[in-house]
Amino acid sequence: MPGMPRRRTLPVAISLVAVVAGAWGLAATMAPPLQALQPSEQALVELYQRVAPAVVRLSRGEGVGSGFVYDAQGHIVTNRHVVAGARTVDVTFLDGTVMTGQVVGTDPDSDLAVVRVERLPAGVEPLVLGDSTAVQVGQTAIAIGNPFGLSGTMTVGIVSGLHRTIPAQARRSAGFVIPDVIQTDAAINPGNSGGPLLDSSGAVIGVATAIALGSPFPAFAGVGLAVPAHLVERVVPSLIAHGSYQWPWLGVSGVGLTPELARANGLPPETRGAYVVQVVPGGPAAAAGLRGSTRPTGAERLPEGGDVIVGIDGSPIASFDDLLVYIARYTSVGQRLQVTVLREGQRLDVPVTLTARPATLPEMP
């Protein structure tokens, strides 16, 4: 009615909220304590508490990625695509400490990079690299990073595949690939790039670098991919010392030998090896006399006449991926190899001296 004051409802509402909150708090104090952690849970909690302080957030502008402390001198391993084009990045540690990191080296062929900070926060210890050559499908895989900028996130899964091959993002046009990549179903999303993939002891077995997309949206679809630790062991010391890494190069392109391809080349269908489709002009394989296919690949014709690489220095090669892995794991620029090939039904040993990968490839015939 006119002249009557309005009813004030706000204090009543606040009082009701306070009553509900108080009742919830009373119920919480009366609830039984949480059940003790299971041993497997306790192990993960302890691993996170020990490892997470060494996992950092890297940012420049709106871009966010991850990295991990590699040594006591302040070197941090990450992905090249996280720091591409930058000289410095902001490095944020789990405790909130922010430092300026200098980009000291990058490698486009492994998508690895190194950033350095002047000092490490108190209590931060470098992570330990594990033996990624001993990793097995089915073992636990743990990712720690900053997906979508959410710092200090841990996800757990398994190693779901091994020996994957993915294009080197910065060298896609040259046809170079990253071999021996680890596949995991531990959730990896944008922002995880450059963070560690760990085994159950907390050792780094890989560096999260890519995801396989199952939709147009850049979110995890069950397949995460990590550069293996054995490549980190080879590449990172060179990035620290020289700012770059020289990859050994054979100079061939090819495919794994299938039963159909074996028959087309007059070989028993059970024959396995790396079939040489093309030899790069001027490369090490060309200088050594390795042969590529004399017929082009196509939907209706299979290549014929190419060498089949079946061994290197006595180690068997059963596929083209085996060839890439062997070159990446065990060889260096200038090394002389004995390459065993099948050619026109004969088994031959061909000496080849590896050179460094070129910046660009010559035109293929």
Image (tube, rainbow, N blue to C red):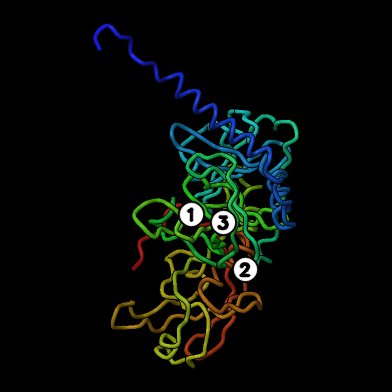
Q: Quadrant of residue 25?
A: top right
Residue 22, image x, y percentages? 59, 30
The residue singled out by tag 2 in the image is 138
Mark 2 crowdedness (10 Å alpha carbons): few <14, some 14-19, many ≥20: few
Quadrant of the image containing the C terminus: bottom left
Give the number of the mark in front: 1 or 2.
Answer: 2
- The CA distance from mark 1 to mark 2 is 20 Å
Q: Which residue is found at the position 56% from the left and 39% from the top?
A: 151
Q: Label 3 is placed on what type of residue?
A: Val
User: Horizontally, is 192 left or right of 137 in the view?
Assistant: left
**What residue do we see at 60% from left, 28% from top?**
98
Work out how far the residue at label 3 is from the one at label 1, CA to CA, in angstroms: 9 Å
Please name which of the two marks, 3 or 1, marks the residue nearer to the observer: 1
Indicate which disc, 1 or 2, sits on the residue closer to the N terminus. Answer: 2
The residue where tag 1 is placed is 210
Q: Where residue 102 sits: x, y (%)?
A: 58, 32
Q: Can you say which quadrant of the picture contains the N terminus?
A: top left
Of residue 223 and residue 8, the one placed in the foreground of this image is 8
For this rendering, which residue is in front, 31 or 300? 31
Q: Is residue 16 above or below residue 342?
A: above
Name which residue type carries label 1.
Answer: Ala
Residue picked out by circle 3: 227
170 sits left or right of 35 in the view: left
Q: Residue at x 70, y 32 (%)?
A: 120
Outermost residue, left side: 2
What residue sits 65% from the left and 32% below the top?
A: 95
Q: Nearer the viewer, residue 87 or 174?
A: 87
What's under tag 2, amino acid-wise? Gly
Q: Give the x, y percent position of residue 360.
A: 42, 54
Name the secondary structure under disc 1.
Answer: strand
The secondary element bearing badge 3 is classed as strand
